[in-house]
Image (cartoon, rainbow, N blue to C red):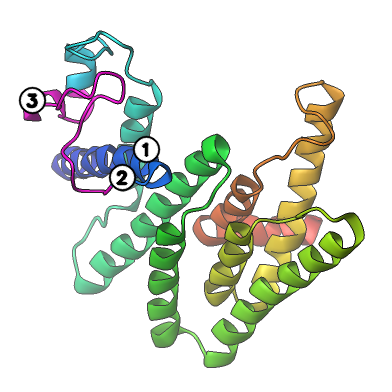
Amino acid sequence: MTHIAFSFCFGTIFGSFLNAVIYRLPNGIGLFLPRSFCPSCKKKILWYENIPLLSFFLLKGRCSNCKVSIPKSYPMVEILSGLVAIILWPKVFSFQKILDFSFYFSIYCVFLSHFLIDIKHKILPNALNFYLAIIFFTFSLVFKSWNHWLYGMLIGALFPLSVTWLFYLAKKKEGLGMGDIKLFGILGIHLGPMGIIHNIFLSCLTGSIFGFMLILLKKLKKESEMPFGPFIILVATFQIFFPDFFNKFLKIF
């Protein structure tokens, strides 16, 4: 029970930091300075008002100064991060298991931040892509062959870029954003040639089905832009965190 409590607390602390990342990066605010503040009244948040989960409930979900509601996504991100930390936390400590935890938990942090930022702002920040690239490249240099990460990266970046360029020539409209293309290339480093091909195909398929359903339900207009990053991340999550399930799905599919 002790390791569960510790890992949950560890995860919620990182979840609190992710909330700052998700708010600050798209708004061009530094991650560490200025100090935490209320987006509505700009009041500086005191340390005891910034304790993961606990402060949200003590403040009854409102700013202590202007009483504006704190987004419910804040405690949700903290709880989710705590649960993910429990799942990934090593039951027996060793140097290799700590490295594995750091690797997979870092991927989770980037994926969640990208997912929520893209839904709200329709961008995939370069800083997150760069951090993810460092993680995957370092891992691949040690555990993967050079042709795995190099060909995966090239296919992941060049194929979507070529399709987007052809789409622009035909329609005079941008098909994929550069953030999406960069993310494909970065994922290719880890997933390799076949893995990134699977991701490109399945993320395009799921995105198309979801967009078509939204249009049918009149929740989205045909000419409206829809963030594509969440579909890339959704497929990559299954590929990286649930590889056995993903491979069984591929055989059925």
Residue 172 versus residue 65 in the image, above or below: below
Q: In this view, does 64 lie to the left or right of 106?
A: left
Q: What residue type is labelled 1?
A: Tyr
Mark 2 surroundings: few (<14), some (14-19) or many (≥20) residues within 10 A: few
Part of the protein shown in magenta = 30-54
Decide which of tag 2 and tag 3 comes sooner along the chain.
2
Residue 48: mark in rendering: 3
**Dot 3: what SS?**
helix
Cα–Cα gap, marks 2 and 3: 22 Å
Residue located 27% across and 49% down the image: 30
Residue 221: mark in rendering: none
Q: Mark 1 sits on what residue?
A: 23
Q: Mark 2 sits on what residue?
A: 29
Cα–Cα gap, marks 1 and 2: 8 Å
Question: What is the x, y in percent for residue 95?
Answer: 20, 72
Q: What residue type is labelled 2?
A: Ile
Residue located 38% across and 51% down the image: 109
**Dot 1: what SS?**
helix
Are the residues flagged by discs 2 and 3 in contact, CB closer than 8 Å?
Answer: no
In this rendered view, identify the residue nearer to me: 114 or 25. Answer: 25
View extreme (bottom): residue? 146
Are the residues flagged by discs 1 and 2 in contact, CB closer than 8 Å?
Answer: yes
Question: What is the x, y in percent for residue 246?
Answer: 64, 57
Decide which of tag 1 and tag 2 comes sooner along the chain.
1
